[in-house]
Amino acid sequence: MSVKFAVIPAAGLGSRFLPATKAIPKELIPLVDKPLIQYVVEEAYEADIDTIVLVTHAAKSALENHFDTQYELETELEQRNKLALLGIARNTLPAGMKIVSVRQGKALGLGHAVACAAPIVQDNPFVVLLPDVICHHAQQNATAQLVADYAIHRSSVVALQEVPVDDVHKYGIAAVSASHRITGLVEKPSAQDAPSRLSVLGRYLFTPHIFAELAQTQRGVGGEIQLTDAMQALLAHETMRAAVFDGEVHDCGDKLGYLAATLTFAKRHPQLGEAFRQLLEQHI
Ligand code: G1P
């Protein structure tokens, strides 16, 4: 069975990024010229996912609007014969992709957000992409790597990346065996308690059995229902593979991480890159 569903948890209120996120969903903040969430949707598309399940919040309908038709804008661009811009406006959702949204009525944590997608995903394998983490890989994107791994091994598989010891308290941290299996997971451990420096970076592929674990997961770190705890519980029944990602990972939910990502993506931008690099030189 191929992987067709991607769950994107996007119900968070973005308090780390205030005041920018007071009236605008944090997922719509642009990285150069494209909102964060569009990078993530395109990553899923490149991995052959055809249905996005957006887990969202009452105050964030702009997210759904971004992927919908905007008649007034499109008619205007058409009448003025601005066809390149019309194409951009129309293709926020890649051709053939479907998007479904579900509400997470209560902010009970990432595990709870993923569980909100269960009625849509049902008995299918699925990926989870955290939209404030933007990844880049020159050959195969992080989600496509997980999907390729699943095609061979038919197991849940999680993208990991090594972080400095001082940062392990910010992430889910995995213990990994020599055969690339995850043997344990801890959410935001102290440096002493961390089983490794391999962090869960925000790209996951799960068999639907994770939903049964999520249904039983109690509140954990921060009083939230943690996805990491449900994954730890799933380890008792199933193999979960580790996929160490060797591309770029940018935490765009953090102001400095976002600035670093902006620099990197602007320097690489096909139209703006060269001019931007010159601009940078003038400022150093
Ligand atoms: C979440 C997960 C954590 C993961 C991180 C990646 O934490 O709970 O396991 O390592 O995303 O960014 P959050 O950043 O929402 O606190």
Image (spheres, grey):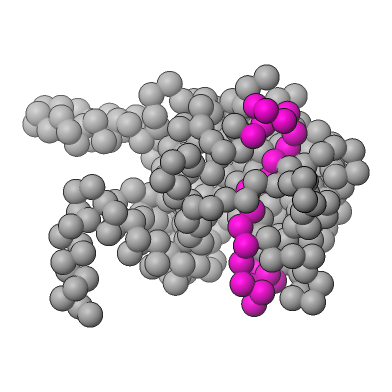
Quick check: is 255 in the magenta stretch?
A: no
Rendering coords of residue 273 (x, y %): 22, 56
Which corner quadrant holds the N terminus?
A: top right
Q: Residue furthest left?
A: 80
Which residue: 79% across, 61% down? 186
Q: In this view of the protein, which residue sits in the foreground, 105 or 48? A: 48
Q: Would residue 91 be found to the left or right of residue 221 on screen?
A: left
Q: Residue furthest right?
A: 236
The part of the image, by quadrant, that contains residue 219 is bottom right
Magenta stretch?
149-170
Q: Classify 146 as above or below 273.
A: above
Q: In this view of the protein, which residue sits in the foreground, 49 or 18? A: 49
Q: In this view of the protein, which residue sits in the foreground, 180 or 182? A: 180
Q: Would residue 283 be found to the left or right of residue 176 on screen?
A: left
The part of the image, by quadrant, that contains residue 125 is top right
Q: Classify 105 as above or below 99.
A: below
The part of the image, by quadrant, that contains residue 263 is bottom left
Rendering coords of residue 215 (x, y %): 84, 41
Q: In this view of the protein, which residue sits in the foreground, 124 or 147? A: 147
Which residue: 54% across, 66% down? 15
Quick check: is 169 in the magenta stretch?
A: yes
Which corner quadrant holds the C terminus?
A: bottom left
Which residue: 85% across, 45% down? 235
Which residue: 79% across, 77% down? 192
Q: Can residue 30 be seen in this snapshot? A: yes
Rendering coords of residue 74 (x, y %): 23, 30
Q: Classify 14 as above or below 87.
A: below
Rendering coords of residue 133 (x, y %): 52, 55
